[in-house]
Image (cartoon, rainbow, N blue to C red):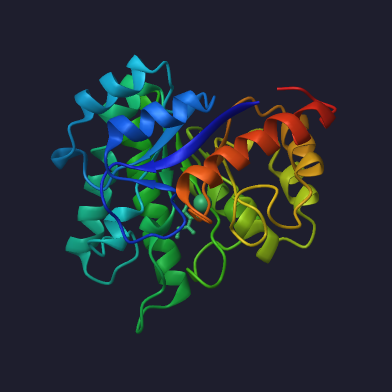
Amino acid sequence: MKLSIVLSTHAAQFAAVAFKGDLASNVAKIAGWGYDGVELAIRDPKVADTGEMLRIVSEHGLEVPAIGTGQAWGEEGLSFTDPDPAVRAAAIERTISHIPFAVRTGAAVIIGLLRGIVKPGVSQAQAMDWLVDALQQCCAAAQPHGVRLALEPICRYETTLINNLAQGLDLLDRVGAENMGLMPDTFHMNIEEPVIEDSLRACGDRIFHFHVADSNRWYPGAGHLDFVSILDTLYATGYQGYVSGEFMPLPDADTSAQKAIAYLRTEVGPRLRVQA
Ligand code: LER
Ligand code: MN
Protein backbone atom coordinates (compact mmCIF):
# COMPACT_ATOMS: atom_id res chain seq x y z
CA MET A 1 0.00 0.00 0.00
CA LYS A 2 1.60 3.24 -1.12
CA LEU A 3 0.66 5.92 1.41
CA SER A 4 0.84 9.67 1.14
CA ILE A 5 -0.56 12.54 3.14
CA VAL A 6 -1.79 15.96 2.09
CA LEU A 7 0.56 18.77 2.87
CA SER A 8 -0.21 22.40 2.20
CA THR A 9 2.85 24.28 1.02
CA HIS A 10 1.76 27.43 2.87
CA ALA A 11 -0.97 28.65 5.23
CA ALA A 12 -4.50 27.92 4.03
CA GLN A 13 -8.03 28.05 5.40
CA PHE A 14 -9.09 24.49 4.45
CA ALA A 15 -9.39 22.58 7.72
CA ALA A 16 -8.92 18.92 6.72
CA VAL A 17 -5.20 19.20 6.08
CA ALA A 18 -2.97 17.93 8.82
CA PHE A 19 0.13 19.85 7.78
CA LYS A 20 0.57 23.45 6.73
CA GLY A 21 3.64 25.64 6.35
CA ASP A 22 7.34 24.83 7.05
CA LEU A 23 7.72 22.30 4.27
CA ALA A 24 11.16 20.97 5.18
CA SER A 25 10.34 20.00 8.75
CA ASN A 26 6.93 18.58 7.78
CA VAL A 27 8.42 16.49 4.98
CA ALA A 28 11.13 15.19 7.31
CA LYS A 29 8.52 14.09 9.86
CA ILE A 30 6.27 12.50 7.25
CA ALA A 31 9.17 10.53 5.74
CA GLY A 32 10.28 9.50 9.23
CA TRP A 33 6.87 8.01 10.01
CA GLY A 34 7.13 5.80 6.92
CA TYR A 35 4.97 7.54 4.34
CA ASP A 36 5.97 6.97 0.69
CA GLY A 37 4.77 10.30 -0.64
CA VAL A 38 3.31 13.73 -0.01
CA GLU A 39 0.37 15.19 -1.89
CA LEU A 40 1.17 18.87 -2.22
CA ALA A 41 -1.61 21.45 -2.08
CA ILE A 42 -0.28 24.38 -4.12
CA ARG A 43 -2.31 27.55 -4.54
CA ASP A 44 -0.24 29.11 -7.31
CA PRO A 45 2.91 27.54 -8.82
CA LYS A 46 4.04 31.03 -9.89
CA VAL A 47 4.54 32.09 -6.28
CA ALA A 48 5.76 28.72 -5.02
CA ASP A 49 9.37 27.61 -5.31
CA THR A 50 8.54 24.26 -6.88
CA GLY A 51 12.21 23.46 -7.55
CA GLU A 52 12.97 23.79 -3.85
CA MET A 53 9.89 21.73 -2.99
CA LEU A 54 11.03 18.94 -5.26
CA ARG A 55 14.51 19.08 -3.78
CA ILE A 56 13.18 18.74 -0.22
CA VAL A 57 10.79 15.94 -1.10
CA SER A 58 13.39 13.98 -3.11
CA GLU A 59 16.00 14.41 -0.39
CA HIS A 60 13.69 12.44 1.89
CA GLY A 61 12.97 9.80 -0.73
CA LEU A 62 9.32 10.77 -1.07
CA GLU A 63 7.18 10.88 -4.21
CA VAL A 64 4.52 13.45 -5.11
CA PRO A 65 1.55 11.42 -6.39
CA ALA A 66 -0.80 14.38 -6.77
CA ILE A 67 -1.06 18.15 -6.64
CA GLY A 68 -4.08 19.74 -4.95
CA THR A 69 -5.41 22.91 -6.57
CA GLY A 70 -8.40 23.83 -4.38
CA GLN A 71 -6.72 26.71 -2.59
CA ALA A 72 -7.13 28.83 -5.72
CA TRP A 73 -10.85 28.57 -4.98
CA GLY A 74 -10.59 28.80 -1.20
CA GLU A 75 -8.21 31.74 -1.09
CA GLU A 76 -8.88 33.54 -4.41
CA GLY A 77 -12.36 32.48 -5.55
CA LEU A 78 -11.23 31.07 -8.90
CA SER A 79 -13.56 28.51 -10.48
CA PHE A 80 -14.50 26.86 -13.77
CA THR A 81 -18.16 27.77 -13.25
CA ASP A 82 -18.07 31.41 -12.23
CA PRO A 83 -20.43 33.63 -14.25
CA ASP A 84 -17.50 35.97 -14.94
CA PRO A 85 -15.58 34.68 -18.00
CA ALA A 86 -12.36 36.26 -16.70
CA VAL A 87 -12.59 34.21 -13.50
CA ARG A 88 -13.22 31.02 -15.48
CA ALA A 89 -10.26 31.78 -17.75
CA ALA A 90 -8.04 32.42 -14.72
CA ALA A 91 -9.07 29.07 -13.22
CA ILE A 92 -8.19 27.29 -16.47
CA GLU A 93 -4.89 29.11 -16.73
CA ARG A 94 -4.08 28.29 -13.10
CA THR A 95 -4.79 24.60 -13.66
CA ILE A 96 -2.60 24.55 -16.76
CA SER A 97 0.17 26.27 -14.80
CA HIS A 98 0.45 23.17 -12.59
CA ILE A 99 1.49 21.02 -15.58
CA PRO A 100 5.28 21.64 -15.47
CA PHE A 101 5.56 20.54 -11.82
CA ALA A 102 3.25 17.60 -12.56
CA VAL A 103 5.62 16.56 -15.34
CA ARG A 104 8.65 16.76 -13.04
CA THR A 105 6.99 14.75 -10.26
CA GLY A 106 4.71 12.44 -12.22
CA ALA A 107 1.83 13.82 -10.14
CA ALA A 108 -1.82 13.90 -11.13
CA VAL A 109 -3.47 17.33 -10.99
CA ILE A 110 -6.52 17.23 -8.73
CA ILE A 111 -9.66 19.12 -9.64
CA GLY A 112 -11.62 19.49 -6.43
CA LEU A 113 -13.32 22.71 -5.40
CA LEU A 114 -11.75 24.56 -8.32
CA ARG A 115 -14.79 23.42 -10.30
CA GLY A 116 -16.82 25.84 -8.19
CA ILE A 117 -20.49 25.79 -7.23
CA VAL A 118 -23.58 26.78 -9.19
CA LYS A 119 -23.76 30.50 -8.49
CA PRO A 120 -27.08 32.42 -8.15
CA GLY A 121 -28.52 33.25 -11.57
CA VAL A 122 -26.65 30.38 -13.27
CA SER A 123 -28.51 27.20 -14.29
CA GLN A 124 -27.13 23.78 -13.45
CA ALA A 125 -26.95 23.01 -17.19
CA GLN A 126 -24.96 26.16 -17.89
CA ALA A 127 -22.54 25.44 -15.06
CA MET A 128 -22.06 21.90 -16.37
CA ASP A 129 -21.36 23.21 -19.87
CA TRP A 130 -18.72 25.60 -18.51
CA LEU A 131 -17.24 22.78 -16.44
CA VAL A 132 -17.01 20.40 -19.39
CA ASP A 133 -15.47 23.09 -21.58
CA ALA A 134 -12.87 24.01 -18.93
CA LEU A 135 -11.92 20.40 -18.31
CA GLN A 136 -11.57 19.74 -22.03
CA GLN A 137 -9.18 22.69 -22.31
CA CYS A 138 -7.14 21.57 -19.30
CA CYS A 139 -7.00 17.93 -20.47
CA ALA A 140 -5.95 19.01 -23.96
CA ALA A 141 -3.11 21.10 -22.50
CA ALA A 142 -2.00 18.27 -20.18
CA GLN A 143 -2.27 15.39 -22.64
CA PRO A 144 0.89 16.05 -24.73
CA HIS A 145 2.89 16.12 -21.48
CA GLY A 146 1.46 12.83 -20.23
CA VAL A 147 -0.20 14.58 -17.27
CA ARG A 148 -3.43 13.23 -15.79
CA LEU A 149 -6.28 15.15 -14.13
CA ALA A 150 -8.27 13.65 -11.26
CA LEU A 151 -11.75 15.05 -10.56
CA GLU A 152 -12.92 14.64 -6.98
CA PRO A 153 -16.62 14.06 -6.30
CA ILE A 154 -17.32 16.28 -3.28
CA CYS A 155 -20.32 16.05 -0.94
CA ARG A 156 -23.41 18.25 -1.10
CA TYR A 157 -22.34 20.41 1.83
CA GLU A 158 -19.40 21.80 -0.16
CA THR A 159 -20.55 21.96 -3.78
CA THR A 160 -23.61 21.56 -5.98
CA LEU A 161 -21.61 20.08 -8.88
CA ILE A 162 -20.54 16.40 -9.01
CA ASN A 163 -21.32 15.02 -5.56
CA ASN A 164 -21.00 11.30 -6.25
CA LEU A 165 -19.00 8.88 -8.38
CA ALA A 166 -21.82 8.18 -10.85
CA GLN A 167 -22.03 11.89 -11.65
CA GLY A 168 -18.25 11.89 -11.94
CA LEU A 169 -18.34 9.06 -14.47
CA ASP A 170 -21.02 10.87 -16.50
CA LEU A 171 -18.80 13.95 -16.51
CA LEU A 172 -15.83 11.91 -17.74
CA ASP A 173 -18.00 10.68 -20.62
CA ARG A 174 -18.88 14.26 -21.53
CA VAL A 175 -15.28 15.47 -21.32
CA GLY A 176 -14.12 12.51 -23.39
CA ALA A 177 -10.42 12.72 -22.45
CA GLU A 178 -8.31 9.66 -21.70
CA ASN A 179 -6.14 11.63 -19.27
CA MET A 180 -9.07 12.53 -17.02
CA GLY A 181 -10.18 10.26 -14.20
CA LEU A 182 -11.70 10.41 -10.72
CA MET A 183 -10.37 10.85 -7.21
CA PRO A 184 -12.81 9.28 -4.76
CA ASP A 185 -12.56 10.50 -1.15
CA THR A 186 -13.87 8.15 1.54
CA PHE A 187 -15.22 11.06 3.63
CA HIS A 188 -17.39 12.33 0.77
CA MET A 189 -18.36 8.81 -0.32
CA ASN A 190 -19.61 8.02 3.18
CA ILE A 191 -22.10 10.88 2.77
CA GLU A 192 -23.08 10.41 -0.88
CA GLU A 193 -22.70 6.78 -2.00
CA PRO A 194 -25.43 4.24 -1.18
CA VAL A 195 -22.80 1.45 -1.14
CA ILE A 196 -19.20 2.67 -1.34
CA GLU A 197 -17.86 -0.62 -2.72
CA ASP A 198 -20.45 -0.78 -5.55
CA SER A 199 -19.63 2.78 -6.57
CA LEU A 200 -15.90 2.04 -6.64
CA ARG A 201 -16.42 -1.11 -8.71
CA ALA A 202 -18.40 0.93 -11.26
CA CYS A 203 -15.35 3.19 -11.77
CA GLY A 204 -13.17 0.37 -13.13
CA ASP A 205 -9.87 1.79 -14.30
CA ARG A 206 -11.00 5.43 -14.06
CA ILE A 207 -9.64 5.97 -10.53
CA PHE A 208 -6.51 8.11 -10.76
CA HIS A 209 -5.97 9.02 -7.10
CA PHE A 210 -7.64 8.28 -3.75
CA HIS A 211 -8.28 10.26 -0.54
CA VAL A 212 -8.86 8.65 2.84
CA ALA A 213 -10.38 10.03 6.01
CA ASP A 214 -12.70 8.20 8.35
CA SER A 215 -16.46 8.87 8.58
CA ASN A 216 -15.89 11.77 10.99
CA ARG A 217 -13.02 13.14 8.87
CA TRP A 218 -10.53 12.11 11.51
CA TYR A 219 -7.63 9.78 10.60
CA PRO A 220 -8.57 6.28 9.31
CA GLY A 221 -9.37 4.12 12.31
CA ALA A 222 -11.06 6.93 14.24
CA GLY A 223 -14.54 6.42 12.78
CA HIS A 224 -16.79 3.67 11.46
CA LEU A 225 -15.64 3.13 7.85
CA ASP A 226 -14.60 -0.40 6.86
CA PHE A 227 -11.22 0.29 5.25
CA VAL A 228 -10.48 -3.40 4.64
CA SER A 229 -13.56 -3.71 2.46
CA ILE A 230 -13.06 -0.31 0.79
CA LEU A 231 -9.38 -0.83 -0.05
CA ASP A 232 -9.93 -4.42 -1.14
CA THR A 233 -12.52 -3.12 -3.59
CA LEU A 234 -10.26 -0.28 -4.71
CA TYR A 235 -7.33 -2.58 -5.44
CA ALA A 236 -9.60 -5.13 -7.13
CA THR A 237 -10.31 -2.46 -9.78
CA GLY A 238 -6.61 -2.72 -10.67
CA TYR A 239 -5.75 0.56 -8.94
CA GLN A 240 -2.03 0.77 -8.22
CA GLY A 241 -1.77 4.36 -7.09
CA TYR A 242 -1.52 6.06 -3.74
CA VAL A 243 -3.89 6.08 -0.80
CA SER A 244 -3.59 9.65 0.39
CA GLY A 245 -4.57 10.84 3.85
CA GLU A 246 -6.64 14.01 3.96
CA PHE A 247 -8.12 14.39 7.42
CA MET A 248 -8.48 16.83 10.29
CA PRO A 249 -5.34 17.52 12.34
CA LEU A 250 -6.98 16.03 15.44
CA PRO A 251 -6.16 15.59 18.23
CA ASP A 252 -3.11 17.22 16.58
CA ALA A 253 -1.36 16.95 13.20
CA ASP A 254 1.49 14.67 14.27
CA THR A 255 -0.73 12.24 16.18
CA SER A 256 -3.27 12.02 13.35
CA ALA A 257 -0.58 11.23 10.76
CA GLN A 258 1.07 8.60 12.95
CA LYS A 259 -2.27 6.98 13.89
CA ALA A 260 -3.31 6.87 10.21
CA ILE A 261 -0.21 5.08 8.99
CA ALA A 262 -0.12 2.70 11.97
CA TYR A 263 -3.75 1.73 11.39
CA LEU A 264 -3.52 1.36 7.62
CA ARG A 265 -0.24 -0.53 7.64
CA THR A 266 -0.70 -2.81 10.64
CA GLU A 267 -4.49 -3.27 11.00
CA VAL A 268 -5.80 -2.91 7.46
CA GLY A 269 -2.89 -3.91 5.19
CA PRO A 270 -2.41 -7.49 6.41
CA ARG A 271 -6.16 -8.19 6.07
CA LEU A 272 -6.42 -7.11 2.43
CA ARG A 273 -7.15 -9.87 -0.08
CA VAL A 274 -5.51 -7.88 -2.86
CA GLN A 275 -2.10 -6.61 -1.83
CA ALA A 276 -0.94 -3.47 -3.54
C1 LER B 1 -10.48 18.23 -1.01
O1 LER B 1 -9.75 17.12 -1.41
C2 LER B 1 -11.75 17.83 -0.41
O2 LER B 1 -11.96 16.69 -0.08
C3 LER B 1 -12.77 18.83 -0.23
O3 LER B 1 -13.54 18.52 0.89
C4 LER B 1 -12.26 20.21 -0.22
O4 LER B 1 -13.07 21.04 0.52
MN1 MN C 1 -10.55 15.09 -0.60
For this rendering, which residue is in front, 216 or 131? 216
For this rendering, which residue is in front, 66 or 25? 25
- The quadrant of the picture occupied by the C terminus is top right
Q: Is residue 43 above or below residue 231?
A: below
Taking the image as shown, residue 112 lies to the left or right of residue 55, namely right
Taking the image as shown, residue 84 lies to the left or right of residue 80, namely left
Where residue 15 sits in the image (x, y, percent)? 42, 60
Q: Give the mark count.
A: 0
Image point (36%, 22%), residue name? 105
Taking the image as shown, residue 186 lies to the left or right of residue 255, namely right
Q: Quadrant of residue 42 in the image?
A: top left
Q: Is residue 151 visible?
A: yes
Where residue 6 sits in the image (x, y, percent)? 44, 42
For this rendering, which residue is in front, 165 or 71? 71
Name, please, the residue furthest toward the left.
47
Image point (71%, 57%), residue name? 223
- The quadrant of the picture occupied by the N terminus is top right
Taking the image as shown, residue 217 lies to the left or right of residue 25, namely right
Q: Is residue 66 visible?
A: no
Q: Is residue 264 above or below residue 31?
A: below
Where residue 89 sits in the image (x, y, percent)? 22, 55
Where residue 202 sits in the image (x, y, percent)? 74, 45
For this rendering, which residue is in front, 239 or 273? 273
Image point (52%, 28%), residue name? 33
Q: Is residue 144 above or below residue 77?
A: above
